[in-house]
């Protein structure tokens, strides 16, 4: 049984359907919107484990990107030849594994972009490339649409279709490869790792890391050591300023002129912004969001003010964005959805008790800590720098992570 209904009354028109099946006619239909880290984690947990106890469960995955993106390795994906299998190490098609791994009565895959949520009707409107706008009905809903990079065209997030993302990766790689001077804007984890990857791959290039704050990495305790390591690699640092304008048009040779908030300016061949993210919540009712646009959830990851809706990952960023927190969110939500089937009390999310931070500095070394305990470079290399955990790409898509 399909829980999709067309909103198109004519091939060339798009309108809302007046009549469609009531959600009361449906039995345990869990719609997961978003096929990234959090969305796939919830989807596979429900299909692998909850399905054994609730054989009538139907999980519908809605995702605008046909491929799962292991964006943790995006900083290396823009270096040609740096990944053993190229972009296949970070991009893997979702549908083939999903629909062939589980019974068709229990799973449905919908390619498209969510454009409207109606909690009263319990429907999500999805703009599909083939069938126009469709209504997807749910009894339980998981919001896992993540966050987009603040600057369009940067491949640090899976913020578009597979084809567009692949194009962004290749265009960024080509830009870096041709540039003699590369500027990385933003001294957070992505910016630091990107600057190090570029310098490690192209030692002769000038790599400048531009950061508004006084310390890199938001003042993390590892920041002083990371800064020393970057300088030892030859990465130039400019702190305490941000770009107020990036002029890509005025120079006939294509040189970019960057003007800074501290009154300075410089020229560069490539300007790569890693600063900021925008939660992908524009399609949701504003009363479900915080003042910063993130989904407002309680300690059980339930969306406040509505029934049977949960949220996970960067779309929540609670207490902050990150892989380990997203994993905790997904485990909590999968369990609470199953508890809701039996009208049992919800359980609060169990976030990691120890804060672990690993920062790669190219493929051969890194800086990290386990709580307040510094980790040797070879430990960071073994855990992250060596492969940026790209072996997890296929595990997420196949569900073997759980």
Image (cartoon, rainbow, N blue to C red):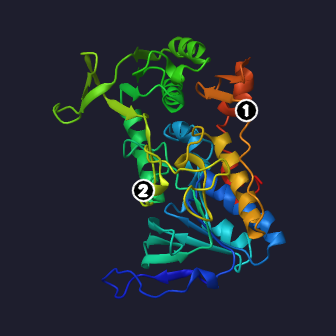
Quarter of the figure with the N terminus: bottom right
Give residue 293's position: percent from left, percent from top. Answer: 44, 48
Helix, strand, or loop for circle 1? Answer: helix
Task: Please tell me whether residue 298 is drawn above or below residue 376 in the rendered image.
Answer: below
Of the pair 37 and 192, the residue shown nearer to us = 37
At horizontal 61% and vertical 52% (from top left) the residue drawn is 312
For the residue pair 381 and 12, the one nearer the viewer reads as 12
Can I make out residue 139 in this image?
A: yes
Mark yes or no: residue 397 visible.
no
Disc on the earlier residue, 1 or 2: 2
Q: Position of residue 362 (x, y in %)?
A: 58, 27
Residue at 61 percent across and 27 percent down: it is 360
The CA distance from mark 1 to mark 2 is: 40 Å
Few, some or many C-alpha atoms within 10 Å of disc 1 (few <14, some 14-19, many ≥20)? some
Packing grade of label 2 (10 A; few <14, some 14-19, many >=20) is: few
- Label ID, residue 31: none
Secondary structure beneath dot 2 equals: helix
Say left or right for 337 vs 63: right
Mark in front: 1 vs 2: 2
Tell whether label 2 touches label 1 (CB within 8 Å).
no
Q: Residue under label 2, please give it.
A: 286
Is 163 located above or below residue 353 in the figure? Answer: below
Give the residue pinned by disc 1.
383
- Can you say whether 87 is above or below 8 in the image? above
């Amino acid at each position: 049984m399909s829980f999709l209904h067309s909103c198109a009354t004519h091939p060339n028109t798009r309108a809302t359907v007046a009549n469609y099946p009531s959600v009361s006619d449906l039995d345990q239909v869990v719609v997961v919107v978003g096929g990234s880290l959090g969305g796939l984690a919830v989807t596979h947990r429900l299909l692998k484990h909850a399905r054994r106890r609730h054989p009538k469960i139907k999980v519908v995955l809605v995702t605008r990107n046909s491929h799962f993106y292991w964006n943790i390795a995006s900083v290396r994906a823009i270096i040609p030849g740096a990944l053993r299998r190229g972009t296949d190490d970070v991009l893997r098609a979702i549908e083939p594994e999903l629909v062939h791994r589980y019974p068709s009565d229990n799973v449905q895959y919908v390619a498209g972009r969510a454009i409207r949520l109606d909690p009263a009707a319990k429907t999500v409107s999805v703009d599909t490339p083939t069938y126009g706008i469709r209504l997807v009905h749910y009894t339980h809903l998981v919001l896992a649409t993540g966050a987009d990079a603040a600057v369009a065209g940067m491949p640090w997030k899976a913020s578009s279709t597979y084809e567009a993302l692949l194009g962004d990766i290749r265009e960024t790689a080509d830009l870096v490869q041709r540039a003699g001077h590369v500027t990385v804007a933003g001294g957070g984890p992505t910016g630091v790792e990107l600057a190090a990857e570029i310098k490690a791959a192209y030692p002769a290039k000038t790599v400048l890391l531009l950061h508004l704050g006084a310390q890199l990495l938001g003042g993390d305790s590892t920041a002083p050591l990371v800064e020393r390591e970057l300088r030892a690699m030859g990465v130039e640092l400019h702190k305490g300023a941000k770009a107020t304008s990036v002029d890509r048009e005025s120079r006939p040779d294509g040189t970019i002129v960057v003007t800074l908030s501290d009154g300075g300016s410089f020229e560069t061949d490539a300007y790569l912004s890693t600063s900021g993210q925008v939660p992908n919540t524009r399609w949701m009712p504003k009363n479900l969001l915080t003042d910063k646009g993130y989904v407002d959830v309680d300690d059980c990851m339930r969306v406040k003010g509505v029934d049977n809706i949960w949220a996970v990952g960067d779309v929540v960023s609670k207490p902050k964005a990150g892989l380990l927190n997203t994993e905790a969110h997904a485990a909590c939500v999968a369990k609470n959805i199953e508890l809701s089937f039996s009208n049992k009390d919800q359980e609060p999310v169990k976030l990691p008790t120890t804060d672990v931070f690993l920062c790669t500095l190219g493929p051969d070394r890194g800086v990290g800590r386990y709580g307040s305990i510094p980790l040797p470079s070879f430990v960071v290399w073994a855990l992250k720098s060596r492969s940026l955990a790209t072996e997890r790409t296929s595990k997420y898509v196949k569900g073997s992570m759980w």
